[in-house]
Image (spheres, rainbow, N blue to C red):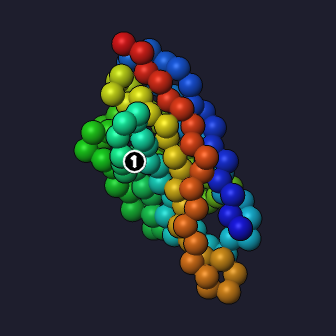
Amino acid sequence: QVQLVESGGGLVQAGGSLRLSCAASGSIFSINAMGWYRQAPGKQREFVAVIKTGGIINYAYSVKGRFTISRDNTKNTVYLQMNSLKPEDTAVYYCNTEGTLPGSTLFVSWGQGTQVTVSS
């Protein structure tokens, strides 16, 4: 089993910043990618950012230039620095991790979600 624990959400005014963290634990052999998705009320969950093994990074167009994803491989932790936040960034943010368990079993895990609310 792989557990993801997220932290760092909250309420912030437009133009402000927040930093999300997500730590993965469990019987993990290797992690291939760690990323963030978000789901606003009444909308489908959408991709935000991902960082893959080798340092490959992708962002959703809506957050490019404002959000920065990073990863600490020694702690199996991924971060999302969110700057210049807008009310439309309000959503529940979910951490997602893909990797391999001992024995070469692939896994995909999701965090419980953390609320980010941006007031205008």
Residue 104: name its quadrant: bottom right
Query: Is 116 situated left or right of 29 in this image?
Result: left
Residue sticking out furthest to the front: 42
**In-front residue for pair 60/116:** 116
Residue nearer the viewer, 56 or 41: 41
Question: Which quadrant is the C terminus positioned in?
Answer: top left
Residue at 38 percent of width and 17 percent of height: 14
**Residue type highlighted by circle 1:** Arg
Question: Which residue is at 67% across, 48% downward?
Answer: 5
Instruction: Name the secondary structure under disc 1.
Output: loop
The correct choice, above or below, for 103 with respect to 94 in the image is below
* Residue position marked by numbered label 1 in the rendering: 45
Give the residue drawn at x 57%, y 37%.
114
Q: Residues within 10 Å of mark 1 (few under 14, many from 20)?
A: some
Residue at point 41%, 29% (across, down) = 90
**At which x and y percent is residue 34?**
51, 58
Name the one closer to the observer, 107 or 85. 107
Locate residue 46, reporting x and y percent.
36, 48
State whether residue 49 is above or below residue 66.
below
**Can you see residue 16?**
no
Please give left or right for residue 110 compared with residue 103 in the image: left
The answer to whether any part of residue 43 appears in the image is yes
Residue that protrudes farthest toward the bottom in the picture: 103
Q: Where is residue 96 in the image (x, y as percent from the top left)?
A: 52, 56
- Percent coordinates x, y for residue 27 in the rendering: 74, 71
Q: Is residue 35 above or below residue 102?
A: above
